[in-house]
Image: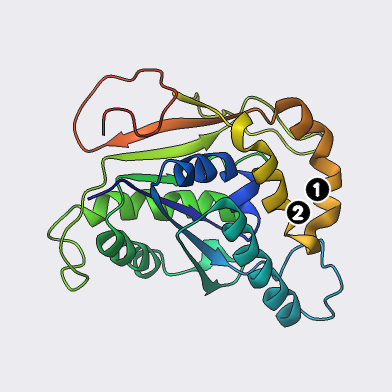
Amino acid sequence: MGLKLMCVVAHPDDECFGFGGALALAADRGIETYVICLTDGQAATNRGEAVSGEELGRIRREEFAASCKVLGVSTHELMDFHDARLEFIDFAKTAGLLVERMRRFKPNVVLTFGTDGGLNTHPDHMMVSMLTTAAFHWSGQAQRYTELGAVHRAERLFYLSTNFFLPGRPRTPMPMPWTATLDVRSVRVRKEDAFRQHVSQAPLMEETKAVFDRYGAEEFYSLVATAEPQPARLSTDLFEGL
């Protein structure tokens, strides 16, 4: 069986804005990828030409699909939760949805945001981090969600980290120290092209362009959980040794 990567995000554009390099690199290696996005981004500040939240959600679903295609994502799924309200969801039920998908897809590696909320310290990102972390552990426990398929224990869980902050945004109190540095220069154009599929978010692209021009050659990830006990070490490959 080939290697598999699962990435869990909160909003359309998270997949390319944060994780696009890792996803494109994995696709180039023939690694099967599955991106799950919990919301359709109806609460976004940038709304394009949408005249309603429902229309914006439809537009952003299409943009998400187009971005995933550019990145070479094997499977993508956009759920029906409301953005800016993830902290009010039923935690155990929502984590169970991710457990079911992990047990069905059987990823080797799982990616998500850190509990700091990422570059913009977004509460939805924080919730996705906590949900994915719980699902990563519960997927491998036979006593949890017994009705949701056979147990699967992924080998690694990584949080997205950073070596910079966005101008004008509140700084997270403690950025997650990274253990993996990915050189994404070979897929940088593709990552940028995926971001451009999110036409409704064009102002965000313009706002962050200078920052990503300066820092966009690398992505940083923190290894926060493994299937077997092991010491922390620096790496340049999320799948090293698998």
Residue at image position (86%, 53%) is 203
Please tell me in which quadrant of the rendered image residue 157 appears: top left
How far across and how far down the image is residue 202, in percent?
83, 55
Residue at image position (87%, 73%) is 49
Q: Please say if the residues under marks 1 and 2 sit with CB atoms less than 8 Å apart.
A: yes
Between disc 1 and disc 2, the foreground one is 2
Amino acid type for the residue under numbered disc 2: Arg
Q: Quadrant of the C terminus?
A: top left
In this rendering, the answer to whether 110 lies above or below 63 is above
Q: Secondary structure at mark 2?
A: helix
How far across and how far down the image is residue 172, in percent?
63, 34
Q: Is residue 109 left or right of residue 65?
A: left
Label 2 sits on residue: 196
* Residue 120 visible within the image: no
In this rendering, the answer to whether 126 lies above or below 44 is above
Residue at image position (23%, 23%) is 230
Label 1 sits on residue: 205
Amino acid type for the residue under numbered disc 1: Met
How far across and how far down the image is residue 110, in percent?
38, 46
Q: Nearer the viewer, residue 192 or 19?
A: 192
* Residue 48 visible within the image: yes
Q: Is residue 157 left or right of residue 216?
A: left
How far across and how far down the image is residue 101, in percent?
33, 64
Q: Earlier in the sequence, mark 1 or mark 2?
A: 2
